[in-house]
Amino acid sequence: MILIVLLAEVFPKPAIIYEEVMSVKKLMLFVVTLALLCSAAAFAQDPVPGGTFRYALTTNPRGMFNPILHTEVYDSYITSVVFDGLIYIDEQLEPKPKIAKDWTISEDGLSITFHLHEGIKFHDGVELTSKDVEYTYKTILHPEYTGVRYGDFSVLVGAEDYHNGLSQEVPGIEVLDDYTIKFTTSEPFAPLLSQFTYGILPSHLLAHIPVGELEQADFNQHPIGSGPFKFVEFLTDQHVLLEANEDYFLGRPLIDTLVFQRVAEDALPIYIQQGRVDYAEISPEQYLEVQSIPGVDVYVYEALSYNYICFNMRQPRFADPVVRQAITYGFDRETYVQVLREGFGIVANAPIPTASWAFTTEGINEYPYNPQLAAQMLAEAGWKPGPDGILEKEGMRLEFEFLVPEGTRVNEQMALLFQQNMAELGIKVNLVFMEFSAAVDRVDARQFDTFTMGWSLSVDPDPYGIWHSTSPWNDPGFYNQRSDELLELGRRETDPEKRKEIYAQWQQLINYELPTMFLSYGVTIAAVSERVQGIDTEPGPLGPLVSLEKLAQIWLAQ
Amino acid sequence: MWRYIVRRIFLQGIPVLLGFTFVLYFVITIAPGSPVTHLRGLPNIDEETIARRAEQLGITEPFPVQYVKWLGRVLRGDLGRSFDSSRRPVAELILERMPATILLSLCSILLGWGVGIPAGILSARRQYSFLDYMITFLAFVGISAPSFFIGLLLLYVFAAKLNVLPAGGFFLAGEPRTFLGYVQYLLLPSLTLGLGNIAGIARYMRSSLLEVLGQDFLRTARAKGLSDNLVVYKHALRNALLPILTLMGFTIPSIFSGAVIVENIFAWPGLGSLAVQAVNERNYPVIMGINLMFAVLIFLGSLIADVSYALADPRIRYE
């Protein structure tokens, strides 16, 4: 019986043992032996190799299966199983070793040295070495590079000169030997490590192609990487088919075939019911229907995203934090989340999601719905009803446009609720529904009073890119010296505890200032067939498959 | 006749296509939103990268320059490369989806003819009967109900409730591609797409046949003692089919534009989702490519209709 307990303890999460791959292999062997020994008792835990796992996609991938060039999330699904990065991000959002068996960070926090596994082979049999890593990252910095990842690595020493064609070398990327590579930044940059997840490209197949023409290479539709699955075929608008990599350095995946199957969004519940797909992300509207299907488990987990209503602080009427706070008090966000979103979301009061390690509730005002308080705050700040009942102060008027990208029912209902709540305070909201691209144009031109949109965030919580005064994405026009200082400090601090403290302070500041009214943190809903074994059944923000990391380990029950 | 066709193509077709592409390119470039708008949501992207991208795509140039460059490429047989991250040639994107769209459209046209004409004949021969009222009623439903509604309804009944047909999509990876399989996957989308067409043809057929049936020469035929079937199918039908023939040419555009919507509902691997995606992302070369192709098809459709009209009716001559 002890054996069985041990088995149950160890098996469901083989990924937690990562430091040494050999030990993972040995352990797997050990576990498999154990499983064989007591297979009668451990019937439910027997991993069965073989079978086809189908993952539903509602949108066709573009066919850009190149980890440094794609911009669409569906293409990234394919690259993340065909290619391996130096590291991967685990369910706790921590960087963990992959192609790099470990790494060392220098005392001054300026450089990271990765030590690569030896003997990793690309799918064409050629060995992966630090040359390939160098090629991959140097290409991102190349002046003719057509992709969008330069901003992630512009902090490397010499990256800017190389990017602008002023030098031929990047001193910040150093190949020390075939299995060691060192990256150096000019100042400490805490988010850097978590960005080394991009798949490593085979330089022997690509180095001869000019970087500017790389995006037109045939390779992008027939990728060759070193990951757990080999690319087989891509049929436009139908499926992407992949097969297990027999020689995968972390052990052959248990499933034989992996399919990303295109399914119409409305048809998802039927596909799940008929067992035509094993895994699908579904919408809140589909939740009840899918949950009642026997043999299917539904997981709801927090996503790394939030949505908001942005105030244009360049306008004098929104410049006073009291106005922004009062409007927040005056909007019933609880009803928005519980009724309009049917509980799929969490009321947000700062821009770092609950799922992140930097999230804090300490010193955070929750702005509970309180129209009396809101009215009182506005009155105390000198806002008085004009002849038409709308609040006025010194020639300013609380009548404004609210720009809402159309297409999602929940958003449109939220806008109506907001309009209604504001009317009770004597604030007139004029709704402007607009197609998404057109709305973004207005926001970019700063031609808005207020608007609503959302952000999806990277794994590292660094909010600099959205909130620093110099950021082009600082839509509200939030210029605050203390905030800038904290943001700069936060990226430079490499001690996680101190960093957490800095971001806690910053969240308190932003929670007081409210350059945007935070609405809710998002959640994702995943439906998984019960025959799929070995997933994370208490998923974090990366879901039951931990992005797609688990695909190499799951197996299918008969 | 040949002179007519050549004149139609060179004096009418080409100028119309040129004007059409010019207006379309102008409209999509002045529409708000730009092909690089969607890059904005990517983590850590900087403004310089977006500006570089805009330059690489050539969208920083003024509209006339962009249009002339595009036209120059098209005249040399190159539709350009898609603006999305894959940068695949537009012709390739269209060609790999074309067979599915043509298959679906053909099936729904065949369905329209195969069901619409007999229904119209039945309706006309039994004018004011219960059957006639039923067909008329169903035809009005078919014409008025929007295809997305019909599509979802059919999906709900046949896939979700009865579980007898697949819920849209196409063959799963590894599923054998049998004839029966094609029928199963094609049935619902082509029915959805063809329904309006069936209804329209049935109505046209009915009124056209009724009109012919009331004419003198048919009374003469009957007076000669010909059987009713012979009168209808040999003499009346040939005349009544004439206007329907013209209709064919003009249903082609509506079938193709309808296919865009129906394909999206059923996740049919044709041009539909590409077209919608391209519009949402302001993917100029793809929008232009698809529309140019549709414009050519529509032009050819109306040309064929006119020509076949002349072939079917000896009184009509084009000079």
Image: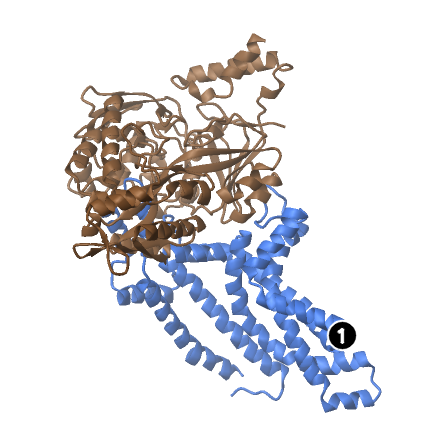
Chain colours: A brown, B blue
- Picture quadrant where residue A398 is located: bottom left
Nearer-the-camera pick, B17 or A76: A76
- Residue B233 percent coordinates (x, y): 75, 78
Residue, disc 1: B129
The type of residue carrying mark 1 is Ser
Nearer-the-camera pick, A253 or B209: B209
- For the question of whether residue A515 can be seen, the reply is yes
Which chain does the numbered disc 1 sit on? Answer: B
- For the question of whether residue A175 can be seen, the reply is no
- The residue at the far right in this view is B225
- Residue B195 percent coordinates (x, y): 61, 64
Q: Residue at coordinates 60% horizontally, 60% vertically from top-left?
A: B192
Nearer-the-camera pick, B191 or A303: A303
- Residue B68 percent coordinates (x, y): 30, 67
- Picture quadrant where residue A358 is located: top left
* Residue A483 falls left or right of residue B180: left
Q: Residue at coordinates 20% horizontally, 19% vertically from top-left?
A: A107
Q: How many marks?
A: 1
Q: Residue at coordinates 37% horizontally, 59% vertically from top-left?
A: B285
Classify B255 as above or below A332: below
- Picture quadrant where residue B218 is located: bottom right
- Residue B209 percent coordinates (x, y): 69, 80
Dot 1: within a 10 Å radius of its alpha carbon, few (fewer than 14), some, or many (20 or more) residues? Answer: few
Q: In which quarter of the image is the C terminus of chain A?
A: top right
* Residue A80 falls left or right of residue A2: left
Classify B313 as above or below A441: below
